[in-house]
Amino acid sequence: MNELTDIFVRSVFIDNMVFAYFLGMCSYLAVSKNVKTAFGLGVAVSFVLVVTVPLNYLINRYLLGEGALTWLNSHFATVDLSFLSLIIFISVIAGIVQLLEMIIERFSPVLYQALGIFLPLIAVNCAILGASLFMQEKNFPTVAHSFSYALGSGIGWLLAIVAFAAIRERLKYSNIPKGLQGNGIAYIITGLLGIGFMAFLGI
């Protein structure tokens, strides 16, 4: 249990997808002008991570990895399909995002309209694919470890975009030099938040 907690806390604060690896920056910058919309997208990204990372873990462990097919027959012990990882992971992510898009359109049309083109673009959010690739690289021993990592990564991304959106809402009342307005000040704030999150390295 302690190991799962460590993975969760580390993926939220230390290995934060935005502030440590700068993954998922497109939607992070584009949909962070309003806290409510940012929260909706953050929850959507978290849901996709929580579903796809453990699913991709199982696919990698029992289908793609070297010797993964031994449960079928011992003759497959030398078979290695890991070269298919990228295309399989992307296909799983795209399928889950399509399902999520239909659910949001059905039950929350307002959020669906607010997210606009960025909802289907979750499928190409590099934070989601990055989490699956990091999961593969970390070689977690169980699916519970991959779930803890996915949940922490999702909450970390949610925390990042909501905090950033809250700051950007306050910036509307600030006197920002013309040359820094828009994405200029956004990049500076993101960098400062990243430096702030480096303080968690001591955990």
Image (cartoon, rainbow, N blue to C red):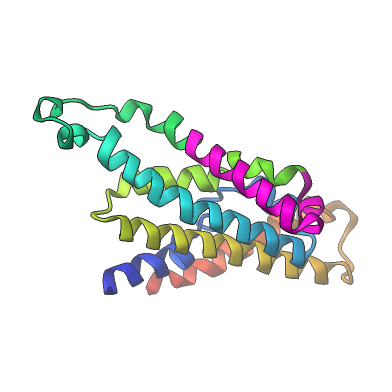
The kind of secondary structure the magenta stretch mainly shows is helix
Q: Nearer the viewer, residue 43 or 23?
A: 43
Residue 148 position, x and y percent, is: 38, 63
Q: Nearer the viewer, residue 190 or 109?
A: 109
Q: Is residue 84 left or right of residue 16?
A: left
Tell me if residue 89 can be seen: yes
Q: How many marks?
A: 0
Question: Could one spot residue 18 in this view of the protein?
Answer: no
Residue in the image at 25% along x and 35% along y: 65
In percent of the image, x 45 and y 29: which residue is there? 87
| Side of 34 where 134 appears, left or right | left
Residue 165 x/y as whole percent: 73, 65
Q: Is residue 192 located in the magenta-colored stretch of the structure?
A: no
Depicted 10 relative to depicted 94: above or below: below
Residues in magenta, as a range: 91-116
Residue at the limit of the structure toward the left, as seen here: 74
Residue 22, horizontal then vertical, whole percent: 56, 50
Q: Residue at x 60, y 45 (%)?
A: 99
Left or right for 71, reference 62: left
Q: In which quarter of the image is residue 19?
A: bottom right
- Asked if 111 appears above or below 65 in the picture, the reply is below
Q: Where is residue 197 in the image (x, y as percent from the top left)?
A: 52, 68
Query: Which image quadrant: the N terminus?
Result: bottom left
